[in-house]
Amino acid sequence: MRHTQQLNHVCVQGLIDRQLPEGGWPFSSHTTQSAIEPTALALLALPSSSVRERDTAVRFLLRTQNANGSWPAFSGDDAGGSGLTGLALFALNCCRAQGMMTNRAVRWLLESRGRESHWLWKWKFRTSDRHVRFDPDKFGWPWMPETASWVVPTAYSILALKYARGISQQDLVHLRIRGGVEMLYDRVCPAGGWNAGNGVVYGFPLAPHPDATALALLSLLNEPPNHFITSSLDWLERRAETCFAPWSLAWTILALDAFVRPTELLTDRLCSVVDPAKANDCATLAVASLALGRSHGPSIFGVNS
Amino acid sequence: MNVDRRAFLAGSLGLTVGAATTALLEKRKYHVIRKQLRSRVAILRAESYSHDLEQILRSGLDLFQLDVRGKTVLLKPNLVDFISGNHINTHPLLVSAAAECFRRLGAKSVLIGEGPGHQRDTELVLLESGFAEELRQQRVPFVDLNRDELVMTSLLASYTGMKHLWLPRTALGADFVVSMPKVKTHHWSGVTLSMKNMFGVVPGAKYGWPKNILHWKGIQESILDVCATVPVHFVIADAIVATEGDGPLNGHPRPLNRIVLADDPVAADATCARLMGLDPTRITHIRIGAQFLGNVCNERIDQVAEAVCAPANPFEVVPEFEHLRVTGSAQRDS
């Protein structure tokens, strides 16, 4: 436990050292282009004592919100919006940074949807393009406008809508959350778990991925128990036995911990594979910090408020 | 055969859309010509993945007299995911052999870059496919192109209708780009060779996993736009064990025991297709690419090592691409 806390402290310091002057974090610490995913994850990972760093990160996120309420993928990106809008909103809400931006972001999330939800594409996927097994009636959120729904942006968006506070249009929010959850169940891999969002292609089951599975599970945390969730947790536990990559391992720990499954051995392994001094990827460092930090406090993704 | 009215209408509509799409694709939509008068291709025999690959590759590269002295060389392998037993990635031994060869040729720096389109955790793919250990031993730097710094780049062809793509600075800054595909069939594009391999420079951090915008804009069209914009200077294709059937992930291994080198991506892909028993002129991006990116006709390709030898049994493909297979008299003529 002590070692875990010490390592997390070093991870947090590594994040602070890598924060860019504008308040964001890049993916690669060799670059100076802030991106939304590492910034939001770092903001979630920083302890409340890092007041100045959190404050500049919050201000960076508020400043980069697009006029339509969405967030771009990175600083300078096109203004159409990205599938990371849910993550940015979730991070800001966790920091109690609410206000005008929340309603604008929620409104954008309510309007954003996978392109397969349009009647024309539904017809196409039902009649002529049936190689990927999915139900186009069950849609979530895309990575970028005018593309289909995928697991990770859908999971981020569900998390954002479930935990957003003080928002209007509750009925619509509830409807979109239910739709997103149904989409995740529809896209689950046959043996449990999720990948990008194609469970079966040309009749062959595709393998799930640990990070997508963990994120989907975190977004389903308060859903009634069912075999999709159980089989995915079981798959994630089995897969974790041979996983040594920090990003996947950290997400796995966060998900298993949120569902009260044992993670001690995995945490020990994460400690052995994370080297904050050499870590180049800020998003990975942030998720590792989140996974290590949950051992001495409630997991940010497990908060049921 | 019974054809009901709905099936007839759907079929007619499909044919009309298909014909219109083909006509649109054939229209000139490129703003750059990279095609050379003649192209050079070397088919090299390699029985297995071993440390002999460096020697084989070195002798093959000597045939091209490449001048990479003082240049930054980017090796772009095909890393999709790791599925034990499936030959879906360019083999790490071939990539490290290529890195060593380019260093010996005097490159200022050699680095490897890839942005997997399916798996978000690139480090997981590197660790489990054996790449991480090989790169560590050879001290070759790796750049995750999915998470690199991005630069807005005007497209030099307009088959997709997109005006620009955000592309990784590492790929744009390289002086010499080497596409290193795994030779595979592909259920959406027919084949995935050196041109399709360039999808890996399109960053997931902007376009997601998968890079779904490229599918919606048309895979064949996107291949042409990307290859027009990010020039491929050289190709080293891994056909030692290729993949047939439902590629890129669920195909079956098919040994060809060959490495294909080329100074032209279209000529490389046309040659690989012929080695697979497929007709390159029926593969849309190769056929259209031959207008401005390289040569597809045998008459314009100098085979500087082995001659092309089509297999008696063409590669298996999914039903939609059955027409690519060259069989019977067509095989003798190709």
Image (spheres, helix red, strand yellow):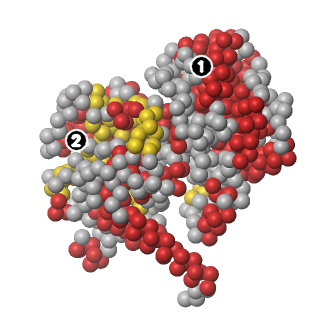
Position of residue B86 measured from the top left corner of the image (x, y, whole percent): 46, 50
Position of residue B204 measured from the top left corner of the image (x, y, whole percent): 51, 40
Residue at image point 66% right, 21% down: A59
Q: Nearer the viewer, residue B290 or B88?
A: B290
Q: Residues at badges 1 and 2 in contact (C-beta under 8 Å)?
A: no
Residue at image point 61% right, 29% down: A64
Position of residue A152 measured from the top left corner of the image (x, y, whole percent): 64, 41
Q: Nearer the viewer, residue B10 or B180?
A: B10
Element under label 2?
helix
Q: Indicate the chain on which mark 2 is placed.
A: B
Q: Residues within 10 Å of mark 1 (few under 14, many from 20)?
A: some
Position of residue B4 measured from the top left corner of the image (x, y, whole percent): 61, 86
Left or right? Give the position of A181 relative to B62. right
* Disc number for residue B257: none
The quadrant the C terminus of chain A occupies is: top right
- In the rendered structure, which amino acid carries the disc numbered 2? Leu
Residue at image point 58% right, 86% down: B3
Q: Residues within 10 Å of mark 2 (few under 14, many from 20)?
A: many
Could you tell me if residue A64 is visible in this image?
yes
Q: CA distance from mark 1 to mark 2?
A: 47 Å
Q: Check disc 1 and report the residue beneath it.
A: A23
Q: Check disc 2 and report the residue beneath it.
A: B57
- In the rendered structure, which amino acid carries the disc numbered 1? Gly
Element under label 1?
loop
